[in-house]
Image (cartoon, rainbow, N blue to C red):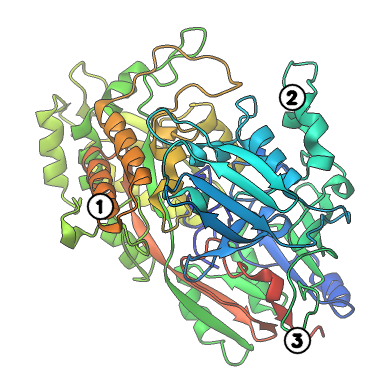
């Protein structure tokens, strides 16, 4: 499992508060080891952990890395966890027309939901037409399907019980990968979409919350939800109607039950792994040297997956808008600082990122300079001309002075009106590493006269603050993938997760005086062009231009890329591990086995 949080956020598609801080390392653990060992002696099971409760059981409404969906739902296609190749899932095949505007999927024969009901093209039609493409449903999934400058959505129609056709307004090279979005059950959810609650919104928006009886959650993935206890655990049970079969025709998955504990303390989880209570653990750099010495004696192996997929960064709130009452989301004084490019660049030069790698990551990582994962063929390296912010406090001071800032006798940075430059960094309280990194950044900025205040908060609180635009600067890590367009909902100005300058959202209170900058509009144009283009060399040039803009404007300051390390007990068989796998060591959970339950 990687140093980034365990998440199946559809790769970059959501880029949501998708998200896990670099040190929110999700590892496998148990709250009651002896009880769980006794249970495991009777049935094959794994015990895993997360840093926070799931926020919803409704996939369309999810915006959190800590979610149940890697275990419970499948889409038409999937991505291979090692190669990122698009592979069949609920759809056994697909055809793309010569004009690339018609894509037809053929479902596997005999698909069923976990309640035994047939899964047909009606469910696919319902999922896309009535949920994802329904503007009354505020889902982040929709952004990945918007096509062209007009942000049009495809039409979708049922051809027969097993075939569904999407009609695109124009060719879209990322469209196929986007169809790994989960398919939802029409027979359980259709009525909630077309019935309104007392608030005038579809009842779907309050359906399948975490207060729902798990027995009501119908799934099509390898597992169902057996039980949920808030702040304690989610228990998954094997789906008896799961479509995958083993090499001998046996029903998958092999592991009967998964216990997913809510455990926030990384040190405690590591102690449990060392005591033998856990099957897996994503390793922090400080864990590696310690556990490496115990590898043979304690019957586990440490797997190196290479650079983690995704990005670790701090972001500035550039939003100059106000709420419906006219109150600015960001203090106007600080908003002026944040919206000066030289200020953002100065902060980037001030941060000693190499020191973070050398001291905090124990040398197990590399500098990060791009919003695109290093594994992607579209990644632009510094050697290819990408701008890099080496640690240079003097350069930072020169930029600030050139932008009208000044220093007082104490070396404190003031703006042109004499205001002390001071702002707050939100970061996840559960992440010890995030807080240590925050402390170093605090010290780095002090060297150029800026006071950085750290505000560690619960992960879900952090997510809520960002969604409400109630923040100045935040620190997080987002999972990544090979397709840049999967980040459209974050990087395009109309995206529902365009955090650093979030515009109006469907179903949310109106905002006033929202401004989209010229460079944001250019990113919008590049994303449209990249989606239209099928020539790989031309696509690479388009996304190279995108990366150059981001590194010049630095609405986000990219920090470091840690190495993905995971310790796996010898009793767990079938693990395939890579830094590209955003699901940790569990992307192929359906074929994992445990060989000793004693």
Mark before the other along the chain sequence, 2 or 1: 2
Label 1: which residue?
538
Front-most of 92 and 441?
A: 92
Position of 425 compared to 357: left or right? Answer: right
Label 2: which residue?
202
Distance in Å between CA atoms under marks 2 and 3: 47 Å
What residue appears at the point 68 percent right and 33 percent down from the top-left corner?
A: 130
* Residue 109 in picture, x, y percent from top left: 76, 62
What residue appears at the point 38 percent right and 39 percent down from the top-left corner?
A: 315
* Residue 573 in picture, x, y percent from top left: 66, 83
Mark before the other along the chain sequence, 1 or 3: 1
What residue appears at the point 77 percent right and 42 percent down from the top-left corner?
A: 210
- Mark 2 element type: loop
Label 3: which residue?
595
**Furthest residue toward top:** 325
* The quarter of the displayed image where residue 416 is located: top left
Distance in Å between CA atoms under marks 1 and 3: 49 Å
- Mark 1 element type: helix
Q: Residues within 10 Å of mark 1 (few under 14, many from 20)?
A: few
Position of 550 compared to 361: left or right? Answer: left
Distance in Å between CA atoms under marks 2 and 1: 42 Å
């Amino acid at each position: 499992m990687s140093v980034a949080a365990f998440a199946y956020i559809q790769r970059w598609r959501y880029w949501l508060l998708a998200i896990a801080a670099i040190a929110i390392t999700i590892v496998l653990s148990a709250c009651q080891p002896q009880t769980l060992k006794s249970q495991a002696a009777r049935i094959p099971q794994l015990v895993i952990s997360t840093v926070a409760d799931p926020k919803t059981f409704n996939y369309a409404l999810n915006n959190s890395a800590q979610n149940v969906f890697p275990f419970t739902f499948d889409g038409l296609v999937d991505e291979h966890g090692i190669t990122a190749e698009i592979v069949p899932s609920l759809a056994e095949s697909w055809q793309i027309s010569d004009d690339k505007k018609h894509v037809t999927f053929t479902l596997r024969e005999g698909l069923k939901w976990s309640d035994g009901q047939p899964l047909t093209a009606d469910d696919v039609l319902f999922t896309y037409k009535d949920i994802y493409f329904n503007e009354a449903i505020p889902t982040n999934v929709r952004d990945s399907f918007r096509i062209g400058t007009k942000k049009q959505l495809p039409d979708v129609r049922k051809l027969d019980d097993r075939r569904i056709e999407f009609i695109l307004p124009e060719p879209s090279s990322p469209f196929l990968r986007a169809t790994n979005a989960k398919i939802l059950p029409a027979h359980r959810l259709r009525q909630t979409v077309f019935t309104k609650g007392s608030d005038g919104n579809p009842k779907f928006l309050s359906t399948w919350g975490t207060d729902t009886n798990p027995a009501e959650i119908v799934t099509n993935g390898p597992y169902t939800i057996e039980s949920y206890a808030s702040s304690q655990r989610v228990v998954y049970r094997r789906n008896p109607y799961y479509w995958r079969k083993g090499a001998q025709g046996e029903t998958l998955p092999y592991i009967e039950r998964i216990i997913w504990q809510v455990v926030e303390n990384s040190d405690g989880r590591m102690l449990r792994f060392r005591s033998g209570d856990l099957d897996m653990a994503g390793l922090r750099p400080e864990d590696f040297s310690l556990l490496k010495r115990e590898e043979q004696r304690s019957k586990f192996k440490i797997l190196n997956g290479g650079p983690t997929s995704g990005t670790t960064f701090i972001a500035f709130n550039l939003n100059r808008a106000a709420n419906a009452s006219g109150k600015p989301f960001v203090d106007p004084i600080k908003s002026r600082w944040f919206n000066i490019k030289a200020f953002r660049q100065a902060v980037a030069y001030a941060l000693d990122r190499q020191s973070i790698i050398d001291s905090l990551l124990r040398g197990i990582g590399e500098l990060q300079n791009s919003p695109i994962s290093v594994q992607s063929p579209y990644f632009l390296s510094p050697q290819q001309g990408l701008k890099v912010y080496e640690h240079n406090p003097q350069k930072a001071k020169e930029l600030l002075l050139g932008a009208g800032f000044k220093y007082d006798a104490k070396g404190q940075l003031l703006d042109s009106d004499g205001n002390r430059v001071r702002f707050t960094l939100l970061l996840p309280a559960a992440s010890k590493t995030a807080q240590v990194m925050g402390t170093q950044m605090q010290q780095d900025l002090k060297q150029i006269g800026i006071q950085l205040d750290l505000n560690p908060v619960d992960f879900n609180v952090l997510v809520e603050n960002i969604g409400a635009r109630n923040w100045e600067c935040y620190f997080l890590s987002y999972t990544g993938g090979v397709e840049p367009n999967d980040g459209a909902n974050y990087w395009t100005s109309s995206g529902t997760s365009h955090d650093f300058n979030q515009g109006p959202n469907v179903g949310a209170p109106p905002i006033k005086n929202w401004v989209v900058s010229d460079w944001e509009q250019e990113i919008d144009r590049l994303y449209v062009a990249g989606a239209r283009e099928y020539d790989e060399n031309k696509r690479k040039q388009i996304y190279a231009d995108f990366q150059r803009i981001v590194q010049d404007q630095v609405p986000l300051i990219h920090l470091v890329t840690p190495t993905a390390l995971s310790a796996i007990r010898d009793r767990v068989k079938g693990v395939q591990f890579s830094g590209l796998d955003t699901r940790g060591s569990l992307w192929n959970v359906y074929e994992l086995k445990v060989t000793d339950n004693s």
